[in-house]
Image (cartoon, coloured by chain):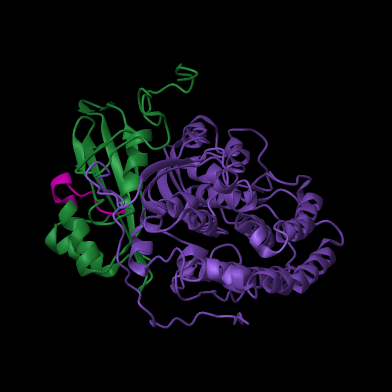
Amino acid sequence: MEMIAPQHGSVSAAGPRVLPRANPYLDIESYEAEGDLMVLNMGPQHPSTHGVLRLKLWLDGEEVVKAVPYLGYLHRGVEKLLEKLTYVMSTPIVDKNDYVSSMTNEIALCMAFEKLEGTEVPRRARYMRTIVAELQRVASHLLWLATFALDMGGALGGGTSVFMYCFRERELILDLFEELTGARFHYHYHQVGGVRHDVPTGWDARVHEVAARILERIPEYEQMLAENPIFLKRTRGIGRIDVGLAQELGLSGPNLRACGIPFDLRVLQPYAAYDEIEVRTVTAEGGDVLARYRVRVQEMRESLRIATTLIDGLPGGPIMGRKPIETPNAVRPPAGEAYVAIESPRGELGTWVISDGSPKPYRAKIRPPSFHALSALPWLLPGTTIPDVIVILGSLDPIMGEADR
Amino acid sequence: MIDVEATRLVAERFGLDIGAHGPTVPPERLLELARALKDELGCGYLCYVTAAHFPEEKRGEETLPARFVVVYRVRNLDRNTEFPFRCEVPIDAGVPSLAGVWAGADWQEREAYDLVGPRFEGHPDLRRIMLPEDWVGHPLQRQYAIDTPHAPWR
């Protein structure tokens, strides 16, 4: 039996941390195949590509020798749209970037605008932001766990069981958000200077109820997955990425923490209310698929603890730190430039904005963690087989809406 | 937190002031700075590479030519520091690619080239990444209208 020990903060440098690197620029014309050389197009409508991603794979017999991802199927020109919309109008647009974690998208954007404008967010609003961000992290990790288990297919005894269970729990969190904001997926909850809705009566008790129910069920998933020898065989040592390459590629969030690096912006650059609560960074050793799974499952427990602790200590006061936004041109930051990064469920979600003093940004760039995670594929896939390709892709937790924007 | 050693290196070896948003490095010395940051100062984490387009503008008598500003941000995760720097080039000149220094610069530069337009010289595989290969123009340039017509299928 595989025990999942909670690993907090401590990092040992044990194990081989430098791995031989694959050559993503392999010249296929001059490649001498041992078996039959075959080109396989996976996607864009493949159920395991988590959205619309196309992978062009060159196979030598069963082994992948070169992988070229093609992105852009969900490119909507969000950065161009942000230039054409006013600061006030842009929050609901970025909701659709990382569509399973809308709350953190809005926080990242609003925080960049607040930094440009120099707006202070009141303490109650900062608490609310932290609580919804942590609940959103649990919902997002549950969705990841569900689809990841589905990728493994029938090998896990029933195939869709874990998928159904995780969606059942995720629904509880969506219900909480619906009560708070009136929407289930695209909330438009945050705005420059604070949040839009105050806590409904009795909401804190329901957060506790939901947290208790999910905490009770996480061990059930672990029993179904981490105690299953087939799951362990398919994840341990698969898709290993070494620390150096992970850093060069800009991997972040659970993908980087699974390499043993305690890089967590909630701790290193505390924002919102993270400076008022202890956040324990979850890391794991190995940098393989199993390590990424462990980090995410343990993070769910951490997030539930943070959310319930904060809701108990929710301070009073206003939820908006500037005069109410009544017109689309109300936010007009002075000329300047800002980069703000937050820890979204997938990693470092950053916004880089240039303002020229008008009510619209001059240039806005979103730094999506999924795009960086996908850029690891040409390095990770050579040398593996097709079933591993699916597992590795799933373990990186990419959301194509965010990668393509 | 801004990396103090990188600030010192940029001041002593390159004679540049870091200003509010990092030093502006001349394109011919960009690779030298990148290698120094990674190999000497241990900034192994490439946070992002992006670019912005500034069209020709008149400031009084003076006319500033159209230019690209390419922006980089690197981190040293051991010291928990970061260091932003940038490079300004005229619109028809190239920028040296950093894909040989940080592997992640490959896709980052492809995205900046695709959407904004600077050409990265020495890039191993400079193709469009978001838009189709036959797309005309770079959408994040200022003069590119949001309703620019394009072929509906191909």
Residue name at image x 48 percent, y 19 percent: B153
What is the magenta range? Answer: B19-30
Residue A70 lies, in percent from the top left, at: 43, 40
Kindly identify the residue that appears in the image at 55 percent across and 34 percent down.
Answer: A86
A38 or A281: nearer the viewer: A38
Give the farthest residue toward the right.
A202
Q: Is residue B150 above or below residue B41?
A: above
Q: Main secondary structure of the magenta part?
A: loop
Instruction: Check the picture and name the quadrant holding the C terminus of chain B.
Output: top left
Q: Is residue A312 above or below residue B10?
A: below
Residue B22 part of the magenta segment: yes
| Side of A400 relative to B24 (left or right) | right
Instruction: State which quadrant residue A243 falls in.
Output: bottom left
Tell which residue pokes out farthest to the front in this image. Answer: A35
Q: Locate residue A132 relative to residue B42 in the image: left or right.
A: right
Residue A92 in sight here: yes
What x and y, as percent, mark residue B126?
A: 28, 39
Q: Is residue A220 above or below residue B71?
A: below
Is A182 within the magenta? no
The structure residue drawn at horizontal position 48% and vertical position 53%, both measured from the top left corner, is A386
* Quadrant of the drawing holding the N terminus of chain B: bottom left
Residue A297 vs residue A187, the one in the foreground: A297
Q: Which chain is green?
A: B
The colour assigned to chain A within the rendered structure: purple
Nearer-the-camera pick, A374 or A264: A374
- Where is residue A356 shown, x and y percent of the image? 41, 37
From the top left corner, tell me how far across and down residue A292 is, in percent. Answer: 53, 67
